[in-house]
Amino acid sequence: MTQQDAQVGQGGGQGERKLIAISSGKGGVGKSTVTANIAVAMARMGLRVGVVDADIYGPSIPGMLGIAGNQKPAMSPDQKVIPAEAFGIKVMSMAMLSDDDSPAILRGPMVTKYLQMFVAQVEWGELDVLLLDLPPGTGDIQLTLAQAFPLTGAVVVSTPQDVSLKIARRGLRMMQQVNVPILGIVENMSGFACASCGEVTHIFSKGGGEAIASELGVPFLGAIPIEPEIVDAGDAGIPLVSAHPDSLAAQAYVRIAEAL
Ligand code: ADP
């Protein structure tokens, strides 16, 4: 690790900040939604929060926070990138650097380079926590990223289906192998509560996230129910924690933010 890499987590001497990766074994499990909502929850707790949208192949954080995807970031006089801001959160995303909707075609080493730039050469100011929304998967890119940054730890998001949990287990083991502390597992889309009678139906089975957490000796951070409002909130650019703070799912996000 170079001297510069070693300083990445410290913001170049701007004080101690947590650098937390949000990861998932596969796409579509709600990783970015979890990132956006816990970021808003942390900001509401009074923390100074930054988010790096490291999901380079499907950057969705700006949209979820109502930031125009193609908004070009401004530069500071000392040539640092000034992050976008929404809900009191500072945001840097690959989406802000591409000209259209075409996916960024980058090879692994380039991805790491860009992300190092996002963490080190962005005018974050003083932060208490910087969340890294990782690309989904457990391949070389994720491994390199986990090793390239002095992570405080990683959160793994999974849905309750067996196949998804098996992939999540692989992700947890990968993080453990490269000595990244596991802050915990989040089970998303965990049951659906009927709006009229309140009965919870476990559409994708139940309890698997908790079982894997205890099997691997890592914390279980919580379960987020299936909540149709989450989709609307994400599409509208107002995360559920802000749009419907009293909903069960919003309360689950807040508890996860508090646990981190
Ligand atoms: P990932 O980052 O893992 O690819 P996203 O966060 O983009 O996944 O979520 C995928 C889709 O699932 C989005 O449309 C999102 O709104 C929706 N979603 C995520 N979590 C939930 C949930 N708990 N209930 C209902 N829909 C959800």
Image: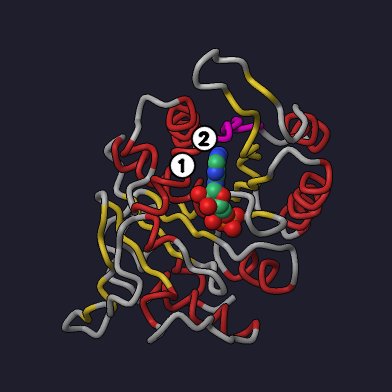
Q: Residues within 10 Å of mark 2 (few under 14, many from 20)?
A: many
User: The residue tagged with tag 2: helix, strand or loop?
Assistant: loop
Q: Quadrant of residue 134?
A: bottom right
In the image, 237 versus 211, the foreground residue is 237
User: Whole-percent x and y of residue 39?
Assistant: 39, 47
Magenta residues, dominant SS class: strand
Per the rendered image, the range of residues in magenta is 220-226
The outermost residue toward the top is 197
Ligand 1 lies under 8 Å from the Cβ of mark 1:
yes
**Residue where numbered disc 2 is placed:** 227
User: Whole-percent x and y of residue 99?
Assistant: 38, 86
In the image, 2 versus 227, the foreground residue is 227
Tag 2: residue type? Answer: Glu
Using residue 254 as the reference point, say whether residue 79 is left or right of it.
left
Residues under labels 2 and 1: Cα distance? 6 Å
* Discs 2, 1 touching: Cβ within 8 Å: yes
Whether residue 209 appears in this view of the structure is yes
User: Whole-percent x and y of residue 41?
Assistant: 37, 38
Tag 1: residue type? Answer: Ile
Q: What's the residue at 46%, 42% (across, down)?
A: 230
**Residue where numbered disc 1 is placed:** 230
User: The residue tagged with tag 1: helix, strand or loop?
Assistant: helix
From this view, report whether residue 176 is shown above or below residue 211: below
Q: What's the residue at 52%, 35% (across, down)?
A: 227
